[in-house]
Amino acid sequence: NDTSRNYGAANPAFTASYTGFKYNQTFINSGLTGAPSLTTSATTASNVGTYTILTAPGTLASRNYSFQYADGNLTIGKATLTVTADNKTRPYGGSNPAYTATYTGFVNGQNSSVLSGAPSMNSLADQYSAVGPYAITADSGTLIAQNYQFRMVDGILTVGKAVITVTADNKSRVYGE
């Protein structure tokens, strides 16, 4: 039977279906014993794509039936990588900081070296924005990867109070005045 999984996951248990029984028989009441061998070359490290599930006799046997084998397909889909815009802070009146992101969900010991391009992150806050929280909107931008799809998570830009220095004016007086 055709089946699927995501990149980096273990292969599921392969199953087979049977057609051509006579007299309303099923696998259970037909006298079939054993099971076919169902194998694939795909491993957890195999790239996104379609791989053949090879069907062979294995231990399958029957007194009343011969067998014709048909291979199936294992489809490996992209794993989901979460891209989270990092939270940032800045003072009122200041410029927005450079936005960065954190990636979670890599499989097979991989890291950001398997990515190309970059996510796009923006905020509606500008230097005139009042104190408070503003969304940092994350978008996939030019980010691509052969074996990953992206789940984008927004961050928060917190505009804090600007510091005003209050300095007492220097004064002088004559002694006794």
Image: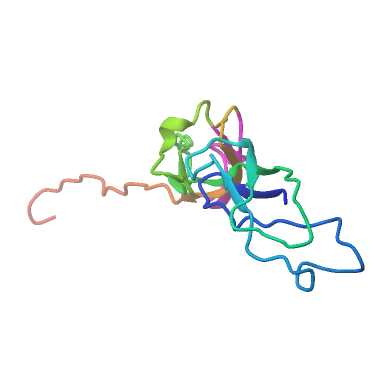
Residue, far left = 175
Residue, far bottom = 29
Residue 129 drawn at (x, y percent): 57, 43
**Residue in the foreground of this view, choosing between 155 and 113:** 113
**Residue in the foreground of this view, choosing between 114 and 9:** 9
Residue 61 drawn at (x, y percent): 67, 59
In the rendered image, residue 33 lying in the magenta stretch gets the answer no
| Quadrant housing residue 74 | top right
In the rendered image, residue 140 lying in the magenta stretch gets the answer yes
For the C terminus, the quadrant is bottom left
Residue, far front = 63
On screen, residue 55 versus residue 93, left or right, reads right
Q: Is residue 155 above or below residue 115?
A: below
**Residue in the foreground of this view, choosing between 78 and 63:** 63
Residue 2 drawn at (x, y percent): 72, 48
Residue 94 drawn at (x, y percent): 45, 37
Q: Which residues are magenta?
A: 119-141
Q: Residue at x 66, y 49 (%)?
A: 4
**Residue in the foreground of this view, choosing between 101 and 51:** 51
